[in-house]
Amino acid sequence: MRAAQRGDRRALDTLLREHYDRVYAVCRRLAGNDADAADATQEALIAIVRGLDRFDGRAKFSTWAYRVATNACLDELRRRGRRPLVGLPEHETAENAPTADRPQLADEITDRLTLDDALLTLPPEFRAPVVLRDQLGMDYAEIAATLDIPPGTVRSRIARGRARLAEQLSGNQHEPDGRPTTQT
């Protein structure tokens, strides 16, 4: 990282390659589709390169990179005014799509799509900490540093986000402001 800050292009390339998969994973889960995730990942990597000289080492580089990625992804979605779309996982094609002789794969894909749909119903302030914790395994301190919010707020948002996910997955719906949807 220090060599990359000094202008060593090989070190920069290595640094970006080491963190690409996790940066993309953050963007993919937040964006909900591959196209927006790829765009946001590219924007995040550009922001990382441009901001490398400002990285001061108070946090781990990965924490800082995930913060940049989270912000880039949310900015990309806001800028485009796009609603995330969920599709088949990128490795699924007509040739290897689930069939009756592979019911476990079909269940896994259904579960993933159901979770992706449910995540997309969460407001970004809940979605980001839930994804960072449950999908990427970051600890609360890393999430707090990544999102620039207090650890107590991280815990609260994760708890509220998980509760909404549980309700969504069980069939209960919420209005955008968090109130339960009233059935008429």
Image (cartoon, rainbow, N blue to C red):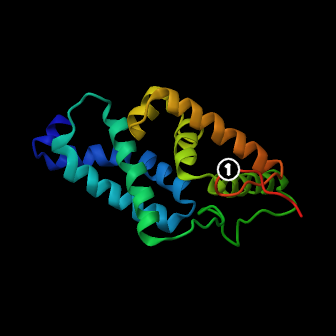
Q: Is residue 88 above or below residue 151?
A: below
Front residue of 43 and 164: 164
Location of mark 1 (residue) = 178
- Asked if residue 4 shows in the view, the reply is no
Based on the displayed image, in which of its 4 quarters is residue 166 positioned? top right
Residue 43 lies, with reference to residue 52, above or below; the image says below
The quarter of the picture where the N terminus appears is: top left
Q: Position of residue 170 (x, y in %)?
A: 83, 48
Residue 163 visible, this angle? yes
User: Of the residues shown, which amino acid type is indicated by label 1?
Assistant: Gly
Q: Position of residue 144 (x, y in %)?
A: 43, 32
Q: Is residue 155 left or right of residue 179?
A: left
Residue shown at 15% from the left, 38% from the top: 3
Q: Quadrant of residue 86?
A: bottom right
Q: Residue at x 34, y 55 (%)?
A: 44
Residue 18 appears at what percent x and percent y?
Answer: 35, 43
Vertical order, 147 against 88 (above or below): above
User: As drawn, which residue projects farthest toward the left?
Assistant: 6
The local secondary structure at tag 1 comes to loop
Image position of 174 (left or right of 6): right
Where residue 125 sits: x, y (%)?
52, 47
- Judging depth in this view, the residue of 92 and 162 nearest the camera is 162
In the picture, measured across the screen, residue 38 lies left or right of residue 126, that is: left
Residue at (57% x, 45% y) in the render: 126
Q: How many marks?
A: 1
Q: Quadrant of the C terminus?
A: bottom right
How many other residues sit within 10 Å of disc 1, few (<14), some (14-19) or many (≥20)? Answer: few
Indicate whether 182 appears above or below 60. Answer: below
Q: Which residue is found at the position 65% from the left and 57% from the top?
A: 176
